Image (cartoon, helix red, strand yellow):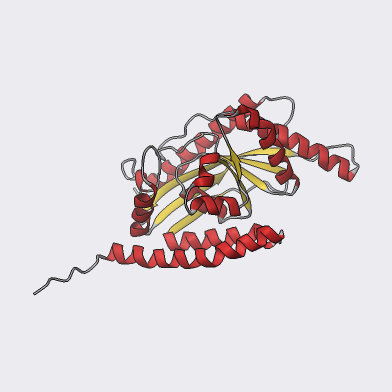
Amino acid sequence: MRQVTIPDTATIRATLASGFLIGITLIGLPLQALSVTAKLPTARWIPVIYHRLACFGFGVRVRTKGRLAIDKGSVLITANHVSWLDIVVLGQSRPLSFIAKSEVANWPIFGWFAKLQRSIFVNRTRRSETGKVAKAIAERLAQGDAMVLFPEGTSSDGNRVLPFRSALIGAASAAMSTASEANQNETSTTSAPSVWIQPVSIAYTAVQGLPMGRQHRPLAAWYGDMELMPHLWAILKEGALDVTISYGEPIPMDDSVNRKQIAQMAENEVRAMTRAALFERRIAKQ
C-alpha cells in the first residue's frame, strides 16, 4: 500500500498563510496601481492596510514605544535594518515612504511593492545622483510624507546595530532645507517649518511567545547571502514573531550640527533603544 505523507502543522499553517497573502496581494496591487496613477488619496493608505493584513498573515505582533513626531514638522526616520520584514512592521503604523537601494526596484514582487509605495531608489555607487535624490526627498517632504532611511546601508543579524552612513542623511538634510524654503515661500511667513531626524529602533524580541536568543534571531533577520524565498517560508511556518518598534527623541535639523554628527547621534540612540528592547524582553521572561 502506498504511504500517504501528512503535512506537519507548521507546513499547513504556512500554506494557509501563503494563500491569504497572495489573496490580499492580488487585490491590493491593482488598487494601489490605480490610486498611484490617478493620484488618489488612497495611494497613501492602501499600503498601511496591506501591511497590517500582512502582519496578521505572517503572525507578527508589533509593540510600539513612543510615537512618530509628525506634529513637529517634516520627519526623516533613521532606522536600523534587520530584515525585509522591517518594511511591513514599519509600514503598518501609518503612511510612510522608503528610501531604498536601487537594486530593490528589480526584485520580483517586492520591487513592485516598493514602487507602488512610492519609494525613492538610490544608486549608492553614483554620487552624481545625490542632487536628484535630494530633490525627490524634498518634494515628498513638502507633500507631508514621512520618509524612512536605513543608514546602515545593509541589514544586520538583529543582535547589533551597524555604523550609520552619513551620505544620505546629508542629502536628506539638504532636501529638507529645500522643502522648508518652499513651504516658507508658500505661506509668506518669516520662519521656516521645523524639520527633524527621528531615530527608530526595530528589535525582534520573541518567537512563539518565548524570548528570541542570539542564536534564534536569524529566523527574523535576513542578511548576508541568505536567499529570500526560503527565509520567507521559514517565517510563515513559524507564525508567531514579536517585534518592538521604539521611536526616539527627534533631532532638529539646523546649522549647529553637521550630517556626520547627526548620523552619530541617531546611531547612538538607535543602538541604545535596540539593546533596551532585547534586554527588556529577556528580563521579563526570567
Residue occupying the point 58% across, 33% down: 266
The x and y percentages for residue 114 are 56, 50
Q: Position of residue 261 (x, y in %)?
A: 62, 25
* Rendered image quadrant of residue 12: bottom left
Residue at coordinates 54% horizontally, 30% vertically from top-left? 164
Q: Residue furthest left?
A: 1
Relative to 241, 165 lies left or right:
right
Residue shown at the point (61%, 25%) measured from the top left: 260
Residue 30 rendering spot, x and y as whole percentages: 58, 64
Identify the residue at the far right of this view. Answer: 188
Q: Residue at x 61, y 65 (%)?
A: 31
Q: How many marks?
A: 0
Asked whether, in this view, residue 20 is left or right of residue 193, the answer is left
- Quadrant of the drawing holding the N terminus: bottom left
Residue 245 appears left or right of 129: left
Image x and y of residue 242, in percent: 43, 53
- Snapshot quadrant of residue 33: bottom right
Residue 17 is at least partly visible in this image: yes
Q: Is residue 29 above or below residue 80?
A: below
**Would you say residue 73 is visible in this rendering?**
no
Depth check: 29 or 83 in front?
29
